[in-house]
């Protein structure tokens, strides 16, 4: 069942997570240097199956017991699972200041303390900020605190709803009509097509009207980046036959909707213009509401369970 749900959301170009950017600051850190102040750096980990997995390191702040780091850490918030986080702060020795952060040996730095929480504890706060007391490796309290702030990445918020239909598609079947579906891909700088969404299959129809799809700006990057729209004739064997394709952008699709015109498909490799055309019945840009929006606005869930003990 979970695989079926995942497949549905992926087919509709919907995510089951929210991309977050974590920012860090600390206060009243211990001073480990004799003639100056500590040079703190923070390392953040996720905890999976009892193992720590590093997801990011901040820059080193020189001579500060109240660091406000610029470097962020990126993480996906999956509200249906527990995501433990560990934050460790080190005083980086002066002789390592020119060493690349990724290769810095943490065992050779002075340990200033660590803190633990679940990602959900941060995002459920009204201002998405959580301050934690630092502890040593044995769990005893140490001087100082670390504050973590979570913010949704800008690209995760914008989206566009579109509904497509086609007219006069070429028929690829002998004894019936084609079973068309659309696949939308983003074209990389090296012209590699990266699929980002597909429609459902419309059986036995050369003038199909598909259900609306949603594309996020994280998927299409920008309104002027190239997209590839392909129309296939579905085959149960998986060998879907290409009916036609066209290259476009989100901006061009918006113009297509406003003009109520159609865009012609082309044959394989774009050598021949086909009679089949693609139309847009809907084009609507929106701010995509996330699970965090519902949490922040006081959303409540009532959950009931019934158990049937009959034989």
Image: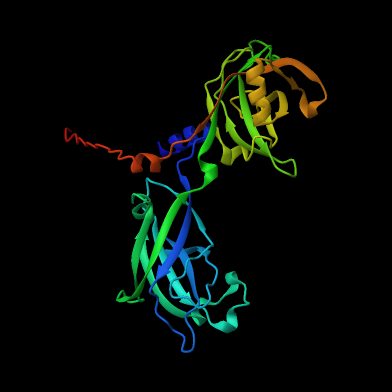
The quarter in which the C terminus is drawn is top left
In this view, the residue in front, 189 or 176, is: 189
Q: Could you tell me residue 297's position as x and y percent?
A: 33, 40
Q: Residue at x 41, y 39 (%)?
A: 2
In the figure, residue 112 lies in which quadrant?
A: bottom left
Q: Decide which of 255, 302 is in the foreground and name it.
A: 255
- The quadrant the N terminus occupies is top left
Horizontal arrangement in the rendering, residue 225 relative to residue 127 (left or right): right
Report x, y in % for residue 309: 17, 36
**191 relative to 301 in the view: left or right:** right
Vertical arrangement, residue 306 with respect to residue 35, above or below = above
* Residue shown at 39% from the left, 74% from the top: 113
Q: Is residue 296 above or below residue 283?
A: below
Specify the quadrant of the image occupied by residue 167: top right
**Residue 44 in sight:** yes
Instruction: Kindly identify the residue that appears in the image at 44 percent across and 36 percent down.
Output: 289
Relative horizontal placement of residue 276, taking residue 105 as reference (left or right): right
């Amino acid at each position: 069942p979970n695989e079926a749900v995942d497949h549905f959301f992926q087919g509709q170009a919907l995510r089951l997570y929210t991309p977050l950017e974590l920012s860090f600051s600390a206060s009243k850190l211990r001073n480990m240097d004799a003639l100056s102040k500590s040079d703190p750096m923070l390392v953040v980990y996720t905890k999976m199956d009892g193992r720590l997995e590093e997801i990011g390191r901040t820059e080193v702040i020189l001579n500060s017991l109240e660091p406000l780091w610029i470097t962020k850490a990126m993480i996906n918030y999956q509200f249906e699972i527990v995501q433990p986080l560990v934050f460790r702060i080190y005083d980086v020795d002066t002789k390592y200041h020119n060493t690349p952060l990724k290769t810095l040996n943490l065992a050779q730095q002075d340990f200033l303390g660590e803190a633990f929480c679940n990602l959900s504890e941060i995002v459920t706060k009204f201002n998405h900020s959580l301050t934690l007391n630092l502890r040593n490796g044995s769990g005893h309290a140490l001087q100082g605190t670390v504050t973590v702030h979570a913010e949704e990445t800008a690209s995760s918020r914008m989206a566009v709803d579109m509904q497509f239909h086609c007219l006069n598609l070429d028929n690829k079947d002998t004894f019936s009509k084609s079973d068309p579906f659309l696949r939308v891909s983003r074209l990389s700088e090296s012209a590699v097509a990266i699929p980002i969404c597909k429609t459902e299959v419309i059986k036995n129809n050369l003038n199909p009207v598909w259900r609306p799809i949603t594309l996020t700006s994280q998927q299409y990057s920008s309104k002027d980046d190239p997209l590839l729209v392909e129309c296939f004739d579905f085959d149960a064997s998986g060998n879907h036959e290409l009916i036609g394709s066209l290259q476009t952008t989100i901006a061009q699709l918006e113009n297509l909707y406003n003009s109520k015109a159609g865009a012609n498909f082309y044959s394989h490799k774009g050598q021949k213009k086909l009679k089949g055309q693609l139309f847009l019945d809907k084009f609507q840009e929106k701010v995509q509401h996330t699970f965090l929006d519902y949490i922040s606005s006081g959303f409540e869930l009532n959950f009931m369970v019934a158990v049937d003990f009959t034989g």
